[in-house]
Amino acid sequence: MIRAGAVLAFLIFGASASADSPQMYSTEALEFAALSPAAAALPQLPPVPLPHARGQGLETEVLFGRRKRRKGAVCGDIDIKGDEAGDIAGTLPGCGAKDAVRVREISGVRLSQSSLMTCSTARALKTWINREVETAFGRRNKVVSLRVAAHYACRTRNNRPGAKISEHGRGKAIDISGFTLESGETITVLEGWKQRKTRRKLKKIWKAACGPFGTVLGPEADRYHRDHFHLDTARHRGGSYCR
């Protein structure tokens, strides 16, 4: 029995085997050892683990997902989807935008129309959406689309002759007139402001824009903004101007 065990050890471990170094076992040796009565006397070594194929596949999956998300991203942010528009020349003195982008979607929330703006404006819009807008009407009925009333336009403020150039004319402003929910319902600023329940939520949305944006105007600002929120990234000495 001892001699058989020695033969088995020689076949399995090899003549130069040592207890401190890992060994590779041949299929023939393992089969012989399993059939022999001396097999019970040999040390039971754990099987050599195979490479974790699933781990490699998961890594590839993650990398592919990242590439897919980057596709169509602008402003160096994978959550801002659109197209680069380059420098926009104005038709009036003071108009125009440098390195502008046409934004279609931010953080999964679509814009009702592709909107031309600067990257700083797009980033402010993202902060506002993530902070308050998306879940303003409930976590189970999220906002999926913003109704855009206006974006880039080379014009004066409120289209008044002789007035200063609007921030819309610099790609720094966007007007939002409504919010479409997962249920398909659209809450407009014009009608929603008249009803107590929706007005309370719209006011929270309006207030949350103060900070990310330098100017925030709503229905209580003046007659020009009774049906939308005007948001722009102009900065003021006293901080954000919100009315």
Image (tube, rainbow, N blue to C red):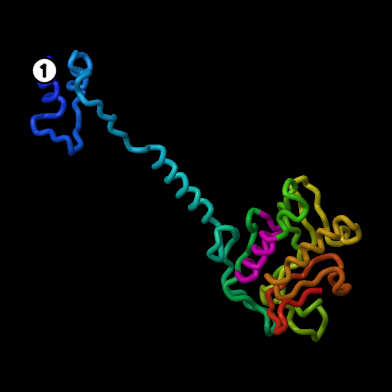
Q: Quadrant of the N terminus?
A: top left
Q: Residue at x 85, y 56 (%)?
A: 198
Image quadrant assignment for residue 72: bottom right
Read off the magenta span. Answer: 109-131
What residue is drawn where x is 31% and y is 34%?
49
Residue 166 in the figure: left or right of residue 200: left
Quadrant where the C terminus is found in the figure = bottom right
- The 10 Å Cα crowd at callout 1, few under 14, some 14 to 19, many 20 or more, is few
Q: Looking at the picture, does residue 146 appear above or below residue 185?
A: below
- On the picture, is 38 further left or further right than 149? left
Q: Is residue 120 magenta?
A: yes
Going by the image, does 39 lie left or right of 141?
left
Whether residue 154 is visible here, answered yes or no, is no
Say whether residue 165 is magenta. Answer: no
Name the image quarter holding residue 219. bottom right
Residue 192 shows in the view: yes
* Circle 1 SS class: helix
Q: Amino acid at mark 1?
A: Ile
| 240 horizontally vs 101: left or right | right
Establish if 55 lies above or below 97.
above
Residue 201, position as x, y percentages in the image: 81, 58
Q: Indicate the position of residue 144 as horizontal and vertical percent values.
A: 71, 52
Return the residue at label 1: 2
Residue 78 picture quarter: bottom right
